[in-house]
Image: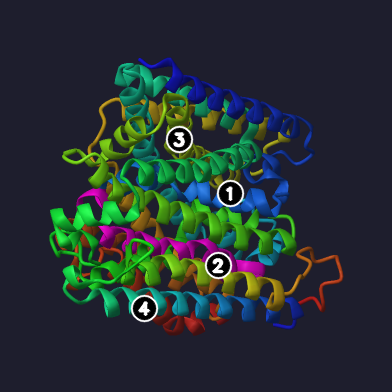
Amino acid sequence: MKDKRFKIAHREAIIGIALVLFNFIWWFGFAYGMGGVDPTEYRYIFGMPEWFFYSCVLGFIVVVILVFIVVNYIFKEVPFEDDEDGGEQR
Amino acid sequence: MNWLVILPLLLFLFVIFFVGFWANKYVLKTDSFIHEYFLGGRQLGGFVLAMTMIATYGSASSFIGGPGVAYTKGLGWVLLSMAQLATGYFVLMVLGKKFAIMARKYNAVTITDFLKERYQSKTVVILSALSIIVFLFSSMAAQWVGGARLIESLTGISYTSSLFIFAFSVLVYVIVGGFRAVALTETVQGVVMFLGTAVLLIGTIIAGGGVDKIMADLVTENPNLVSPFGAEQDLTPLYVSSFWILVGIGVVGLPQITVRAMSYKDSKSMHRAIIIGTIVIGFIMLGMHLIGVFARAVIPGIEIGDKVMPTLTLTVLPPLLAGFVLAAPMAAIMSTVDSLLILVSSAITKDIYLNYIKPNASEKQVKKVSFWVTSIIGIAVILFSLSPPDLIIWLNLFSFGGLESVFIWPIVFGLYWSKGNKYGAITSMIIGMGSYIVFDRLFPNPLGVHTVVLPVLLSLISFVLISILTKNKVQKA
């Protein structure tokens, strides 16, 4: 595969997989790590059980920030049409 | 009948119609009808792309069924629904630029076009088109039923009349405006879904006396409602995690979503769509399911899950605002149905008619066939929906998981694994669909995971294995 655009595309796809793995681990870790105790003993943040706040609310915010950083600083713009300056053609 | 509630709904329909007819201008003046009608001329910008993906994905189950289940199961179901956050970035990142480039190289208008060029196999084309038509047709019927029931419960109009009102409004703008009308109306619908969630969430928290008070009420009723394991402690971590396949990464294999990943204009649109999409889908899913849980403290004792969201809205919000919020599930349903309609129509027109019935049809003929096919499918779904099947959410998940098992590997390996060949694709499509049906009927939750997990794994294994075994056969050909 000689097209330079594909190298960028492949790297970005791998970043997508890495991000989803991170997202899953964060979500799972806080939910079952903190939520595994007796529900009457939960501590609360902003009125929500701690596990829920960290896993679902903070987790959402963290993922959005990561997505923002990744897309703005790591993702590259490439042309999609073949006739534009899109690296070597196959 | 409360006119103050109905007024915003009517206004919403009016805006949708206006947008649909505006899109018709593009259909009339385009020089490539098929690209315009089924793909919006590959011109979607970032905001529209994000909204059309979310609106297509967010359906009756996100606004009606899901919150209803959250109402009975508690925060554990909100946790489960947050697996959907991944769809906001994963589909566009993984299919990404490679898919956009290849789709243009192949001049693909549908997913089937892409598979056809990639695998050069008639069997793949037929399998792909047929599974889109069969599975998405039933999915469409489920959504249609949901939409009609919603109108019925809000206005008191009979189910049959509601069905006709709902179906007619969707049919009109899809038929005249094609994909661009679908994408643009979905942008409006997506915004309504987002704002509706925000308004209802705030209204519910106020009505419940604040988050602290609501949580305390829930703990008093049953402490397990605030645990990740569900009210009956039946949500195991494994089961909940398996939804990451169904509603997270598996969404890559949903044709109605995937086709959007080849409809955008440039890299910049895609980048913006990833950010906006993640924020909006996360907010809607978190918000709507949390609303379902909160509703238990505000309006206790509701027996039918699907009634939770409408009843709550009418209870906690003033009529005019309630009408606006209730436009959100309506928008969610319309925006799913319209995407499915245009997709099924493209499968018949582009994948079957243009491939096998009349390959050299003139532009005028294609136009005529497209309009007719879209109309006939739309009407057929109405007839099917007249005797409605129960439990929207599960019907919806059925057509969901089956299609994911069919398409995920042929698309992903089609893009990233040059050794993947047509034999692998065909086997994995048949095994994906076949095993999904078998598991769904016989062992719905094998090993404690959702039905979708094993079929997706089986289709993965068969794709890789068969592609390697038939390596020589393809090289000789």
The residues bearing labels 2 and 4 have C-alpha atoms spaced at a distance of 33 Å
- Which amino acid is tagged 4? Ile
Discs 1, 4: same chain: yes
Coloration of the structure image: rainbow
* Horizontal and vertical percent position of residue B217: 21, 52
Task: Give the SS element for disc 4.
Answer: helix
* Horizontal and vertical percent position of residue B101: 70, 66
- Specify few, some or many for label 2: CA neighbours under 10 Å numbering under 14, 14-19, or 20 or more: many
For mark 1, what is the residue?
B51
Q: Is residue B461 left or right of residue B283?
A: left
For mark 2, what is the residue?
A64
N-terminal of the pair, mark 1 or mark 4, is 1
N-terminal of the pair, mark 3 or mark 1, is 1
Q: Nearer the viewer, mark 1 or mark 4?
A: 1
Q: Give the magenta part as a residue range.
A: B69-98
* Horizontal and vertical percent position of residue B99: 63, 66
The reply to whether the magenta stretch includes residue B6 is no
- To which chain does the residue with label 1 belong? B
For mark 3, what is the residue?
B325
- Which amino acid is tagged 3? Val
Task: Write the residue at 71% across / 35% down.
Answer: B362
Task: Write the residue at 36% across / 71% down.
Answer: B459
For mark 4, what is the residue?
B461
